[in-house]
Image (cartoon, rainbow, N blue to C red):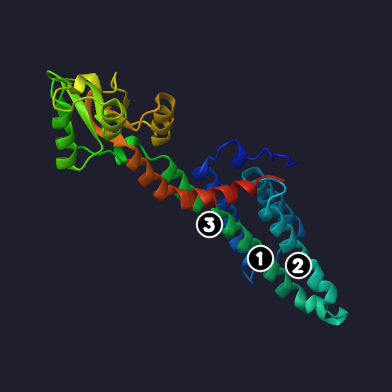
């Protein structure tokens, strides 16, 4: 059974803050990489402690990045052990700087992963207004089902908003025509839209997360939502729009799932 690590990745990322912390560590390592600067053991230990703390806070103590940083540190000692005794002093600086480069490489990889994750987060923050159709196709509630079917075919849409005067009171869809009208043997030439529409009209504000819209559709068992802005209907969100949203985000979300697993053990 996996044990969740209490990292910022598990709690919900503060991505800009975490990226800034890691970049600060990269900035601190640059002077240490200079051949003109002698790296003291105390300064290196202080740097390692700070870097490991940031990586652990962001990705978790058992993440691949924490492990990679440990290997970067161990590489220095292992390389020195393999050097002949008389060459160790001369080679120590080169080996030390190679290890510092490896440390920097791990920190750069951490930043790269968080920047990818920030892109995913932006995608998952997409709002309803990004995906709606703003063409308001409607039909009067006293129109016949045949009239509604012709309008659906004319405009090549799956639903029509239903008007009672100037007010939208519901929606009629191609599914309503087949399930409620055809299946029940209603005469499309004499049966009105009012007999088969879905009401009340379920709406959602354009600024809401699209995931909220998906939940609302599931809750009411519907395939279309009226979208409002300042209480005015400005468009319609349909299942086909939801499919378009998933086609945009699923590849990135798969990457997000992989990153999240790296924050658990």
On the image, numbered disc 3 is attached to which residue? 112
Q: Contact (CB < 8 A) between labels 1 and 2?
A: yes
Of 174 and 233, the residue lying toward us: 174
Of 118 and 78, the residue lying toward us: 118
Instruction: Please say whether residue 230 is visible from this viewpoint.
Output: no
Residue 111 lies, with reference to residue 35, above or below; the image says above
Return the residue found at the far front.
185
Q: CA distance from mark 2 to mark 3?
A: 23 Å
On the image, numbered disc 1 is attached to which residue? 102
- Give x and y (percent) for residue 250: 46, 49
Of 103 and 63, the residue lying toward us: 63
Which disc, if any, is residue 75? 2
Q: CA distance from mark 1 to mark 3?
A: 15 Å
Mark 3, secondary structure of its residue? helix
Residue 199 lies, with reference to residue 8, above or below; the image says above
Mark 1, secondary structure of its residue? helix
Q: Residue at x 67, y 49 (%)?
A: 50
Residue 107 falls in image quadrant? bottom right
Residue 183 falls in image quadrant? top left
């Amino acid at each position: 059974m996996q044990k969740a690590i209490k990292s910022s990745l598990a709690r919900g990322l503060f991505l800009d803050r975490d990226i800034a912390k890691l970049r600060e560590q990269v900035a601190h390592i640059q002077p240490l990489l200079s051949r003109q600067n002698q790296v003291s053991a105390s300064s290196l230990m202080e740097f390692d402690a700070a870097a490991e703390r940031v990586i652990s806070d962001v990705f978790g103590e058992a993440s691949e990045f924490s492990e990679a940083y440990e290997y970067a540190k161990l590489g220095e000692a292992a390389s020195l052990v393999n050097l002949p005794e008389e060459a160790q002093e001369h080679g120590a600086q080169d080996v030390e700087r190679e290890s510092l480069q490896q440390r920097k490489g791990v920190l750069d990889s951490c930043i790269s992963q968080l920047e990818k994750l920030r892109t995913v987060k932006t995608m998952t923050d997409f709002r309803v207004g990004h995906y709606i159709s703003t063409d308001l196709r409607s039909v009067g509630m006293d129109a016949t089902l045949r009239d509604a079917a012709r309008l659906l075919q004319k405009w090549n849409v799956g639903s029509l908003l239903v008007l009672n005067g100037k007010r939208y009171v519901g929606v009629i869809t191609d599914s309503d025509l087949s399930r409620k009208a055809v299946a029940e043997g209603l005469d499309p030439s004499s049966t009105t839209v009012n007999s088969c529409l879905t009401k009340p009209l379920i709406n959602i504000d354009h600024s809401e997360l699209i995931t909220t819209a998906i939940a609302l559709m599931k809750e009411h068992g519907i395939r279309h939502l009226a979208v409002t802005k300042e209480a005015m209907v400005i468009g319609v969100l349909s299942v086909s729009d939801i499919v378009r949203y998933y086609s945009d985000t699923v590849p990135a979300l798969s990457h997000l799932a992989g990153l999240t697993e790296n924050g658990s053990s």
